[in-house]
């Protein structure tokens, strides 16, 4: 018997008004202490940062986070944290802002550089309190113990995994998600679906997370097309946000697999959106893994809304793969990396990083180098 560890934030606020619930609580607990708000320029220009800056909290702003955050950005954000004398951190955004905030939390109590914490449980001291407000419905960075930071020099993505960087409080407020462009909604939504599917079939899966993964697959696949068609559909937004949150609870403990291991180098070397890379790879890697998890993929098909009542388990598992392809098409995901300017030579250079990625260990079947090359070729 192996011991299964379930790890998640102490408190979560979900629903319209969740940001205000957080700021009220922080005013009570931090009083006049200085906090650093870490966000990105787009979110600030949309006016959402005002909700925190004008809440009565004593806050300074660092808003220079870009997609696929790198070690330079982390160092700049940490310098600001020290310069203003901050004692707590709020990460506000998608995965990029929250991951940067997690990295600053690490540096607040541990000697850098941030690259030294690459890997599993390398963080010694927990550091400053961290509150994470999710502005997209995808990465579940507000739930998880992961931070992915690209090395400015080597372009390798450092994947830092530690319980000590799970946010103390997480927030999912769909009212700030209404203006997300449909292409971003689609990519982040399929990222969340990938978390649910990969955690469900992972070698680290457990009965505790299996229920949650299937529920996430169902909530995301039913509601994502509605939100892509109409971004203002707040009920469907809330359901996708819930689905991505519980998918985060699940994969944070059960782990991921080769979709993520192969998507990380694509994001790091070509600066491609994480969700799009996952979406392209998801059906292809699932087809590869299918024969090792036929029973589970049959249940994935059902959760994706396929009527499997007249199908054998084998047929239902195949139907899951078709449904994943169809969902990609329905929400407008590019059909392959070739459309994004990637060549076969590019993908060959990603193979060593994919093999070394910490997510690779969660795949139901260890994928040898030749098969990685072949799957990248199919994904072109
Ligand atoms: Zn992901």
Image (tube, helix red, strand yellow):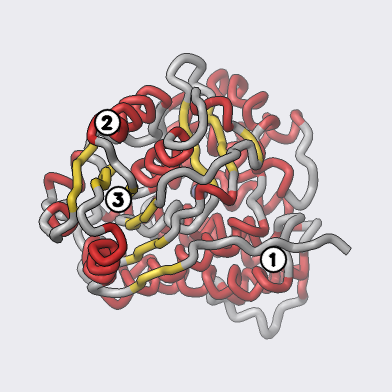
Q: Is residue 308 or residue 132 the one in the foreground?
A: 132
Q: Is residue 197 or residue 103 the one in the foreground?
A: 103
Q: Earlier in the sequence, mark 3 or mark 2?
A: 2
- Horizontal side of residue 53 vs 83, given as left or right: left
Q: Find residue 51 and name its label.
A: none
214 to 47, vertically: above or below? below
Residue 225 x/y as whole percent: 36, 66
Asked where in the image residue 186 lies, by quadrant, the reply is bottom left
Nearest to viewer (mark 3 / mark 2): 2
Q: Which residue is mark 3?
A: 92
Which residue is at the far right?
1
Q: CA distance from mark 3 to mark 2?
A: 16 Å
Few, some or many C-alpha atoms within 10 Å of disc 1 (few <14, some 14-19, many ≥20)?
many
Q: Is residue 28 or residue 47 the one in the foreground?
A: 28
Q: Which residue is mark 2?
A: 80
Q: Are marks 3 and 2 in contact (CB under 8 Å)?
A: no
Q: Is residue 286 or residue 245 the one in the foreground?
A: 245
Residue 168 x/y as whole percent: 44, 58
Q: Secondary structure at mark 2?
A: helix
Whether residue 190 is visible, yes or no, is: no
- Horizontal side of residue 363 vs 238, given as left or right: right
Which residue is at the far front?
32
Name which residue lies at 49% across and 28% down: 114
Q: Find residue 297 and name its label.
A: 1
Q: Earlier in the sequence, mark 1 or mark 2?
A: 2
Residue 56 x/y as whole percent: 13, 59
């Amino acid at each position: 018997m192996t011991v299964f560890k379930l790890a998640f934030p102490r408190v979560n606020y979900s629903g319209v008004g969740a940001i205000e619930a957080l700021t009220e609580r922080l005013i009570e607990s931090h009083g006049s202490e200085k906090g650093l708000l870490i966000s990105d320029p787009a979110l600030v220009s949309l006016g959402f940062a005002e909700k925190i800056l004008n809440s009565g909290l004593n806050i300074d702003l660092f808003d220079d986070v870009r997609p696929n955050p790198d070690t330079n950005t982390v160092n700049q954000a940490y310098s600001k944290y020290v310069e203003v004398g901050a004692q707590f951190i709020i990460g506000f955004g998608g995965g990029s802002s929250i991951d940067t905030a997690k990295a600053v939390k690490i540096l607040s109590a541990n000697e850098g550089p941030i690259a030294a914490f690459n890997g599993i449980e390398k963080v010694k001291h927990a550091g400053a309190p961290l509150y994470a407000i999710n502005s997209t419905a995808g990465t579940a960075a507000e739930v998880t113990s992961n931070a992915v930071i690209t090395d400015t020099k080597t372009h390798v993505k450092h994947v830092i995994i530690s319980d000590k960087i799970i946010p103390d409080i997480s927030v999912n407020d769909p009212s700030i998600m209404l203006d997300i462009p449909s292409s971003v909604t689609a990519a982040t939504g399929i990222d969340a679906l990938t978390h649910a599917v990969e955690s469900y079939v992972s070698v680290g899966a457990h009965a505790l997370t299996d229920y949650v993964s299937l529920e996430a697959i169902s909530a995301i696949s039913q509601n994502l097309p509605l939100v892509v068609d109409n971004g203002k559909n707040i009920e469907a937004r809330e359901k996708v946000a819930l689905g991505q949150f519980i998918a985060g609870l699940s994969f944070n403990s059960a782990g991921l697999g080769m979709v993520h291991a192969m998507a990380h180098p694509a994001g790091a070397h070509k600066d491609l959106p994480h969700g799009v890379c996952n979406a392209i790879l998801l059906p292809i890697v699932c087809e590869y893994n299918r024969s090792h998890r036929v029973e589970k993929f049959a249940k994935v098909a059902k959760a994706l809304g396929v009527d499997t009542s007249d199908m054998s388990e084998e047929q239902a598992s195949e139907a899951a793969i078709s449904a994943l392809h169809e969902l990609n098409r329905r929400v407008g995901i590019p059909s392959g990396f070739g459309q994004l300017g990637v060549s076969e030579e590019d993908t060959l250079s990603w193979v060593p990083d994919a093999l070394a990625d910490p997510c690779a260990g969660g795949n139901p079947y260890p994928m040898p180098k030749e098969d990685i090359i072949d799957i990248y070729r199919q994904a072109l």
